Image (cartoon, rainbow, N blue to C red):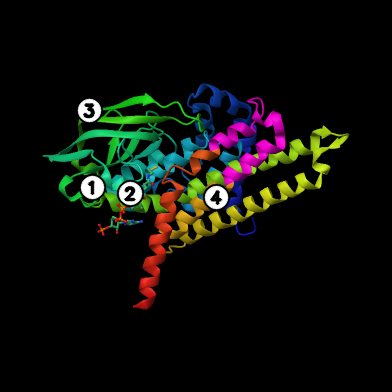
């Protein structure tokens, strides 16, 4: 990558080494068992990678979305599920980075930067997925506390994280405009976890319900002001969707590399199958797609890091484009492997299962198109003014 700085290349190489030396040997195990990969989390901690997107004053490296995307891509090359311990922690930290007070940053960011504590972001509920404004979890002020009631669903890192950023209604009559963002720590009174989900892919990541039953948290854990919660959530997703896109690029690159290696080794009709032009063209298309997605993702990440405003459209486009490419490329990789590709013994069927979620979470690709469409309308209206 000619446009990466020396520091970014160093970060990439650290993550790449963990992916190749540590994750590849265990990815099948974690995919099969669904256990949480704490040994790999330790590797990421020891390499100091949890702090790449945390400001230096809070113990981090001082990078941004680009560094978060680099680490996510590299880890996802080996396993799109294991990489989520890192990536979902980035998502969970974003509300604090974007809207947290100095005190909240000073208290929580150093623990996140060292990887001592994982974080998670809790917006989704059983009846509020795409319609994020339809959440029902409430937070009622009671003296120096807020009391939370409700259930959050499909929370990545749920049960493993120690710090949760949670969106809840402080003024239910105002709907999304009455939402607020909070920090809830593991162990808070009235806070427990629901069942761990059994998923098609990204099985090494933990997905659980968060249950709040008269959960009492300090009032100082409100992020920003009451009523800002939906905006905090949307701004968080604007910054984190390039991370999903980077995960998609990593998974796709992993599948492409596996397909090229296999096609060189596999012989049929007395020659390696890669000698067939039809197969070479298929691989060529896969490689072109992966490169174009990568270029787009880092362009968007870079624009966010340079402080470009109103990045909803670009961020949605990166996630939409890269995830669709990951699905196509991993499906094609299974095809290159033929019958072997369908077998659990080979990595590409897992990559195909892992890729699928990137078209769904942090907003389905249909929602991304809505975000892009609304932005186009806004921009056109502005031009007329
Ligand atoms: N940044 C800041 N504010 C934003 C924003 C953004 N990117 N997007 C919307 N807002 C604000 C709007 O300006 C509006 O504010 P006002 O009420 O003051 O006018 C408010 O939020 C509501 O916006 P909007 O009317 O566009 O909201 P909708 O209910 O139509 O929902 C979508 C918008 C569908 C885009 C949103 O619900 C969404 O992203 N859904 C998917 C959620 C998701 O990704 N879930 C995955 C779970 S997290 S892993």
Contact (Cβ within 8 Å) of mark 3 with mark 1 = no
Tell me which label, 3 or 2, sits earlier in the chain: 3
**Distance of label 3 from label 2 (alpha carbons):** 24 Å
Other-residue count near label 1 (Cα within 10 Å), few / some / many at <14 / 14–19 / ≥20: many
Tell me which label, 4 or 3, sits earlier in the chain: 3
Height in image: 343 above or below 226?
A: above
Tell me which label, 3 or 1, sits earlier in the chain: 1
Can you identify the residue that label 4 sits on?
322
Other-residue count near label 2 (Cα within 10 Å), few / some / many at <14 / 14–19 / ≥20: many
Other-residue count near label 3 (Cα within 10 Å), few / some / many at <14 / 14–19 / ≥20: some
Query: 328 or 262, which lies in front?
Result: 328
Can you identify the residue that label 2 sits on?
233
**Distance of label 1 from label 2 (alpha carbons):** 10 Å
Contact (Cβ within 8 Å) of mark 3 with mark 2 = no
Tell me which label, 4 or 2, sits earlier in the chain: 2
Tell me which label, 1 or 2, sits earlier in the chain: 1
Q: Give the magenta range.
A: 326-354
**Label drawn at residue 179:** 1
**Element under label 2?**
helix
Side of 257 relative to 30 (left or right): right
Can you identify the residue that label 3 sits on?
189
**Distance of label 4 from label 3 (alpha carbons):** 41 Å
| Quarter occupied by residue 26 | top right
- Residue 226, visible in the rendered structure: no
Q: Residue at x 53, y 52 (%)?
A: 321
**Label drawn at residue 360:** none
Mark 1 or 4, which is nearer the eye? 4
Contact (Cβ within 8 Å) of mark 1 with mark 2 = yes
Tell me which label, 1 or 4, sits earlier in the chain: 1
Height in image: 322 above or below 355?
A: below
């Amino acid at each position: 990558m000619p446009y990466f700085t020396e520091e970014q290349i160093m970060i990439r190489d650290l993550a790449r080494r963990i992916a190749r030396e540590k994750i590849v040997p265990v990815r099948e195990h974690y995919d099969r068992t669904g256990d949480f990969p704490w040994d790999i989390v330790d590797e990421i901690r020891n390499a100091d990678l949890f702090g790449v997107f945390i400001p230096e004053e809070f113990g981090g490296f001082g990078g941004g979305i680009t560094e978060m995307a680099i680490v996510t891509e590299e880890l996802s090359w080996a396993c799109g599920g294991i990489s989520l311990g890192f990536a979902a922690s980035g998502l969970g930290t974003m509300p604090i980075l974007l809207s947290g007070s100095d005190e909240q940053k000073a208290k929580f960011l150093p623990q996140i930067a060292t990887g001592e504590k994982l974080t998670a972001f809790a917006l989704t509920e059983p009846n509020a997925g795409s319609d994020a404004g339809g959440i029902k979890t409430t937070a009622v002020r009671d003296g120096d506390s807020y009391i939370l009631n409700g259930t959050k669903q499909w929370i990545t890192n749920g049960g493993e994280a120690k710090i949760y950023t949670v969106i809840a209604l402080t003024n239910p009559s105002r709907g999304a405009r009455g939402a607020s963002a909070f920090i809830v720590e593991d162990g808070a009174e009235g806070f427990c976890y629901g069942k761990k989900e059994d998923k098609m892919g990204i099985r090494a990541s933990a997905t659980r319900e968060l249950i709040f039953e008269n959960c009492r948290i300090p009032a100082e854990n409100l992020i920003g002001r009451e009523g800002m919660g939906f905006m905090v959530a949307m701004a968080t997703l604007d910054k984190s969707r390039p991370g999903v896109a980077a995960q998609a690029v990593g998974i796709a690159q992993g599948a492409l590399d596996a397909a090229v290696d296999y096609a060189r080794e596999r012989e049929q009709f007395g020659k390696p199958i890669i000698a067939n032009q039809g197969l070479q063209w298929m691989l060529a298309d896969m490689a072109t797609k992966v490169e174009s997605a990568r270029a787009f993702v880092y362009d968007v990440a870079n624009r966010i890091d340079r402080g470009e405003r109103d990045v909803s459209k670009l961020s949605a486009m990166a996630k939409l484009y890269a995830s669709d490419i990951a699905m196509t490329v991993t499906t094609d990789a299974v095809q290159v492997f033929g019958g072997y590709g369908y077998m659990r013994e080979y990595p590409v069927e897992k990559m195909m299962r892992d890729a699928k979620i990137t078209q769904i979470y942090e907003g389905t690709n249909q929602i991304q198109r809505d975000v892009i469409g609304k932005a186009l309308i806004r921009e056109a209206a502005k031009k007329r003014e």
